[in-house]
Amino acid sequence: MTELPQTPPPLCRPGCEANALTAIALSLLARRKLTVSRGLVERIAECGPPGGSLPDYLEKLVRLPDNQRLTAPQWRVLLQQAEPIAEQMTRSGVELVSLFCADYPPLLAEINDPPPLLYLRGNRALLSQPQLAVVGSRNSGSPTLQLAQRWCHSLAAAGVTITSGLAIGVDGAAHRGALAAARPTVAVMATGIDRLYPARHCQLAEQIVAQGGVLVTEYPPGEPPLPGNFPRRNRIISGLSLAVWVVEAAIKSGTLVTARAALEQNRELLVLPGSVNNPLTRGCHLLLREGAALVESPADILALFGDNYRLDDSAPALAAQPSPLLMALGYDPASTDELAERLGWGAADTARQLAELELQGVVARLSGGWQRC
């Protein structure tokens, strides 16, 4: 089990304008040519907070190779670009947590490429709490999403902070499970703090903030959901967390990217097994073959967080709403008559409900019968 390190001593005065501008400038530079590494964290600790000429301080702090060095005017342009961002964040109530801040998430500061700056809305203290990252497919079926939501409900009720990526599918189920337990949750975004994505989760995002959770991103305001942002975002999801639970993962998926990042960051990797006929669990089985821990219940996950975290038997259970027809279908093709026999239903009623599921894109008619999409 990864242990939380001690919070480092303060590196700067809270609310210092120079610190904010410097952090934003470093963040903008990281998008261009700066390779952020543990060395930058150490340099900040060595150099202390910004002082004197900010371009001179940044030059001393960053130590770019000779062929990439910026002149003092170029540094000033970078700081000029940072100023309107700082003003916009102040007006919109967005907070900044940088490597200069004493409350920068300690586990995140330990990874090889920590983001120099986090933009956030909500409860910043939550970022330093023990967290479980929950990741999985955007295309998971209803039974998997219901399981993820129930487990996250139980884990959140036990005091574990659920962290995920605000995407459709497993991410949304994880956040909703925590919220249903009246507990806060962390949503790590792959866009600017002012660009909620996907749009269908705008209400969910606002609910997360309203219930004491936090939205967080390393990207500046206005950043769209570019494809390359999501793998970068995933390292933050795992970096904030003590462990990563993989609910479902195809062989080629962003979920496996997060799992690889978790292993590189020395995080516990927990995997839920599934049907060998389900393409969305083949990545899970690959991780299990490579040594990830198999989990079969919330108790298996909670055991990693120590004796202070216990399942709350008195907490109201989250009602499950399984689809009997999907449960009967599983992941192997079956005919209408076979499904009707398994369920004890009439053939006409079974055919009608299969047609409804086909219209929803949940099942498809194949030569061998019906199969999940």
Image (cartoon, helix red, strand yellow):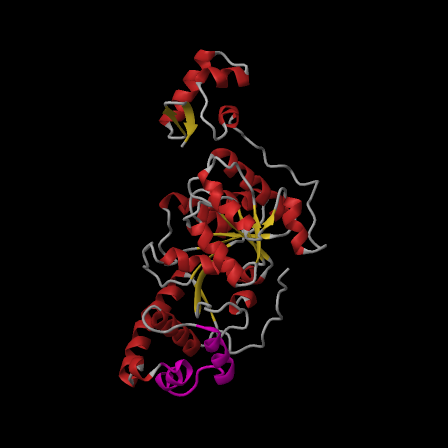
Asked whether 282 falls inside the magenta stretch, the response is: no
Residue 104 to residue 46: above or below: above
Question: x and y percent of residue 59 in the render?
Answer: 37, 84
Residue at the image position 58 percent from the left and 74 percent from the top: 8
Residue at the image position 32 percent from the left and 84 percent from the top: 66
Camera-nearest residue between 15 and 275:
275
Asked whether 39 falls inside the magenta stretch, the response is: yes
Residue 68 to residue 188: above or below: below
Residue at the image position 55 percent from the left and 43 percent from the top: 177
Look at the image and tell me in which quarter the C terminus lies. Answer: top left
Residue 191 can be seen, yes or no? no
Residue 92 can be seen, yes or no? yes
Look at the image and tell me in which quarter the N terminus lies. Answer: bottom right
Question: x and y percent of residue 203 in the render?
Answer: 43, 45
Residue 289 to residue 341: above or below: below
Camera-nearest residue between 274 and 33:
274
**Which quadrant of the view contains residue 217?**
bottom left
**Which quadrant of the view contains residue 268?**
bottom right
Camera-nearest residue between 223 and 85:
223
Boundaries of the magenta span: 37-64
Residue at the image position 48 percent from the left and 69 percent from the top: 112
Question: x and y percent of residue 361 in the render?
Answer: 37, 30
Q: Is residue 308 left or right of residue 48?
A: right
- Most prominent secondary structure in the magenta stretch? helix
Q: Is residue 266 left or right of residue 120?
A: right
Camera-nearest residue between 54 and 138:
138
